[in-house]
Image: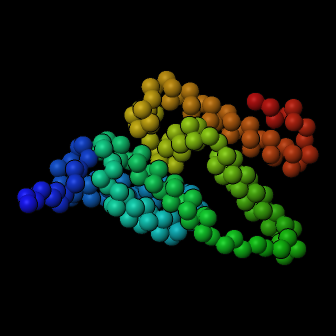
Amino acid sequence: MSAEPIDVFPALPYGFELEGDFVTQVEELRSDLVRFASWLCRDRVTGEDLVQETLLRAWRGRHALRDMRLLKAWLLTICRREHSRWLARQRHDTTSLETLDPAKEPETVVACDDEIALHEALLELDAAYRDPLLMQLVMGYSTGEIARAMGLTLTATLTRLCRARAKLRAAVGQEMAQERGYSSSVTSV
């Protein structure tokens, strides 16, 4: 009975030879991941925890990555999915509206409401529009880097960014107009 040789080290993704290369490249992207996760969670400490979960999941699934050129997009996707899992596990504490006193700090309440409306509208965008916009605004990618990461032409990337901003402007403007009692024709884009 002949034994087949067992491959202890599965095939590594295209673009690196050793697992040390994987670790090195992931460490180079860590600050971008922390910034993205902190933005998603609205908290730096929670964002860092989310990055830890992301990196653990990436390490376990590192052999599924076929091309190292897609590492950053792959890690951002894992991070976004980990954030969704984290949200599903959270127990959201509620605050009674009677305990809030907008008269004490009206600017803070309005600014907070506007920020929440913007964040929610951004999360409501289709991924095709949300992802390139987040890559540009939160991650600081250039248009060319976004195009390469998403496999799009430069023109298609610029179009998606423009449409994403228009959709976001329309969604936030519509919501604010409804809250303040304006007609919907004022905010049409």
- Res. 24 image quadrant: bottom left
Q: Is residue 132 left or right of residue 108?
A: left
Q: Is residue 127 above or below residue 162?
A: below
Residue 95 spot, x, y in % from top left:
78, 73
- The scheme the figure's colours follow is rainbow
Q: Is residue 184 above or below residue 112?
A: above
Residue drawn at 76 percent across, 57 percent down: 113
- Res. 187 image quadrant: top right
Q: Is residue 110 left or right of residue 41?
A: right
Residue drawn at 47 percent across, 50 percent down: 77
Instruction: Tell me if I can see residue 115 in this picture.
Output: yes
Residue drawn at 42 percent across, 32 percent down: 151
Q: For the view shown, which residue lies furthest in the left direction?
A: 2
Q: Is residue 162 above or below residue 10?
A: above
Residue 142 spot, x, y in % from top left:
44, 37
Residue 156 spot, x, y in % from top left:
51, 26
Residue 115 spot, x, y in % from top left:
69, 54
Q: Is residue 176 left or right of residue 140?
A: right
Quadrant where the N terminus is found in the figure = bottom left
Residue drawn at 53 percent across, 42 percent down: 131
Q: Is residue 138 above or below residue 189?
A: below
Quadrant where the C terminus is found in the figure = top right
Q: Is residue 154 left or right of residue 58?
A: right
